[in-house]
Image: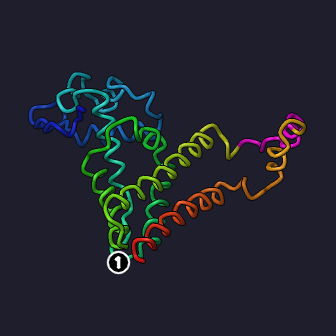
Amino acid sequence: MDSVWFSKPRPSSGQPLGLSREAIVRKAVEMLDEHGMQKLSMRKLAAALGAAPMSLYWHVPTKDALIELCLDEIYGEFELPDPDTEWETAVREMMHSLRRLAFKHPWWVRGIGEFNSIGPNAVAMADSMFAPLLRAGLPMPLAAQSISTVSSFVVGYAVAEVNFVGRGGMDSPPPDLGKIADLYREKHPNYVAMLDEQEIWSLEGQFEFGLDCVIDGIRAKVAAVRS
């Protein structure tokens, strides 16, 4: 596995406009927030910085390396719970923080799993996630598996949410459930019955339900270890 984190950044001395890796990453994050990952290019980034494209490669060897750096920059915004917070409250707070980051930086949540997440901020975030469950008595394997499971739920849910919102889901007219029901009433009656259950159409409600289900499972693991 290759990663930008395995090499040291070059010094910024002698570069135009005092160009640095930090300045490049800050501007790249701004562009990613505005336009998304597909529209980011080293040439566009250089133009936004008022620099020659090749000067960026002194600090960032490839576009993938730049994305790694940008992803880790966002991990640095993660809100850590108070160390004395009870484990379940801490996990809930962290998962809500993760979801908020996904909405703030949609490109970031879509990049999780596609790019390495071994930067200092990502590792600090992971380490902080383990701590409440270790304090609750879970051994490291169970703590790590529990955090992986609950964060995977949140990331998966958030990706679907940001995609829905990104295509105007919150501002678009609601789907015509009557027409959908007419299409499937005979062949798929359970699906049609589901359309009438209004509580499932709440994004907040669905998120809390899923989070409750996962935390219920973790709670059972904690109780088993303590018994």
Tell me if mark 1 has few (under 14), some (14-19) or many (20+) residues whose alpha carbon lies within 10 angstroms of its own.
few
x and y, in percent, of residue 26 in the image: 31, 43
In the picture, residue 176 is in which quadrant?
A: top right
Residue 13 belongs to magenta span: no
Closest to the observer, 127 or 61: 127
Question: In this view of the protein, which residue sits in the foreground, 173 or 219?
Answer: 219
Where does label 1 land, which residue? Answer: 84
Residue 156 as seen in the image, left or right of residue 222: right
177 on left or right of 124: right
Where does the image place residue 18, in percent across and percent down from the top left? Answer: 17, 37
The colour mode here is rainbow
Q: Residue at x 41, y 57 (%)?
A: 147
Identify which residue is drawn at 54% across, 48% down: 158
Lateral position of residue 176 relative to residue 10, left or right: right
- Residue 56 in picture, x, y percent from top left: 23, 28
Q: In the picture shown, does residue 1 fall above or below 170?
A: above
Which image quarter is the C terminus in? bottom left
Instruction: Please tell me how many numbered marks the rendered image carries.
Output: 1
In the image, is residue 177 part of the stretch drawn in magenta? yes
Q: Quadrant of the N terminus?
A: top left
195 w.r.t. 56: above or below:
below
User: Could you tell me the amino acid type at mark 1?
Assistant: Asp
Q: Which residues are magenta?
A: 172-184
Q: Residue at x 36, y 57 (%)?
A: 144
- Apparent side of residue 26 relative to residue 57 in the rendered image (left or right): right
Q: Is residue 90 above or below residue 7?
A: below
Q: Main secondary structure of the magenta part?
A: helix
**167 and 211: which is toward the camera:** 211
Q: Secondary structure at mark 1?
A: loop
Residue 90 coordinates in the image, percent (x, y): 42, 69
Snapshot quadrant of residue 78: bottom left
